[in-house]
Image (cartoon, coloured by chain):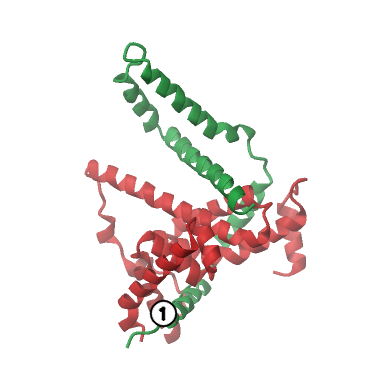
Chain colours: A green, B red
Amino acid sequence: MKKSDEQMARQAKEAFDSSVDRLDAATLSRLNRSRHAALAEASRPREAWLRWIPATGIAAAMVLAVMMLQGPEQFDAMHAPANDLEILLGEESIDMLEDLEFYSWLDSEELQDDGNLG
Amino acid sequence: MTTDALDFTVSCTLKPTGARTLQKERQLDEFLADVERRALRIAEIAVRDREEALDLVQDAMIKLVRSYSERGSDEWRPLFYRILQNGVRDWHRRQAVRNRVMVWFQKAKNDDSDYDVIAAAPDPDGRTPDQELQNSEAMQDMELAVHALPTRQREAFMLRTFEGLDVAGTATAMGCSEGSVKTHYSRAIHTLRDKLGEHWQ
């Protein structure tokens, strides 16, 4: 006989809580340090220029679109992807793109939350 | 931690700004201390790697404090888990890209076949009474089953069952409707019951 959904959820919660209680001291210490690092980081003001990154990205995309519409005389579409690839393959650029993704996501979150929660 | 000890810690580590009061920072500290261990285990189940989970939890803490510290404390829990779930999804996306690149260069390490469930299980820290062992084994079975769920079902199940968020809070954390939460949760728990039922009698 199968357990009910409620029994399954309760048993899963008990097993989960037990695993939380068994976390070792080293892990708890890491969590404690992470928490204090987060709170200390929060005291640093966010760089103002970072707020412009999403807008800068959109503007760059628009400029690229306009250049492509100008035709092959003004924009060498065969060479541009190769140059982009060199840029994208750099480790720093990948990190930057990951940050861009986050800031773009965070800004969209704030806009959405302003509508839903604010 | 006593109130005095907490006051000392906060006064030593935090520099209140005009926009954020000491009381707010103390609330944030208490909130993060309350949520951090469960958040770690939830992230660990999702990514199957404690070090990665620790990094994800720290990132979520930083992003919550940076972006949402001025929100009401009752909003922090779903927002924190929303950030954490996004971090987990991004982590899986990066892993997928990394794996594709590795396969392309024929350097795949075949991680799945090398994965050792026992070695990766939470360390019981030397405590080996029968109940501890049974709990640990039960958690391993359940952890693997939860990890195998589709992403949205896994998120709904862990947020509702492990973290105890209500349907509205889970919907905020997942960025979807309450109806979707109910659907994902229902499917998840039925799948788990089918997989684990005979072992969880």
Looking at this view, is B59 or B122 the one in front?
B59
Work out which quarter of the rendered image holds the C terminus of chain B and state it. Answer: bottom left
Q: Could you tell me which quadrant the N terminus of chain B lies in?
A: bottom right
Quick one: which residue is furthest to the bottom in this view? A1
In the image, residue A42 lies at what x, y percent? 65, 48
Instruction: Rate crowding at label 1 as few (under 14), some (14 to 19) or many (20 or more) other CA atoms within 10 Å.
Output: some
Residue drawn at (40%, 71%) of the image: B186
Q: Amino acid at mark 1?
A: Asp
Q: Secondary structure at mark 1?
A: helix
Q: Left or right? Give the position of B53 relative to B99.
A: right
Residue displayed at 72% across by 59% down? B26
Residue B129 visible? The answer is: no
Name which residue lies at 63% across and 36% down: A47
Question: In the displayed image of the protein, which residue is found farthest to the left?
Answer: B106
Where is residue B170? Give x, y as percent: 51, 63
Image position, residue B128 (x, y; %): 44, 81
Residue B44 drawn above or below residue A111: below
Residue drawn at x 76%, y 60% is B8
Q: Along the horizontal axis of the image, is B113 left or right of B169?
A: left
Residue B9 to residue A74: above or below: below
Q: Is residue B6 above or below residue B126?
A: above
Whole-percent x and y of residue B184? 40, 65
- Callout 1: chain: A
Residue occupied by mark 1: A5
**Mark count:** 1
Q: Quadrant of residue B74?
A: bottom right
Q: Quadrant of residue B180?
A: bottom left
Q: Is residue A110 visible?
A: yes
Instruction: Name the image quarter holding residue B2.
Output: bottom right
Name the foreground residue: A54 vs B120: A54
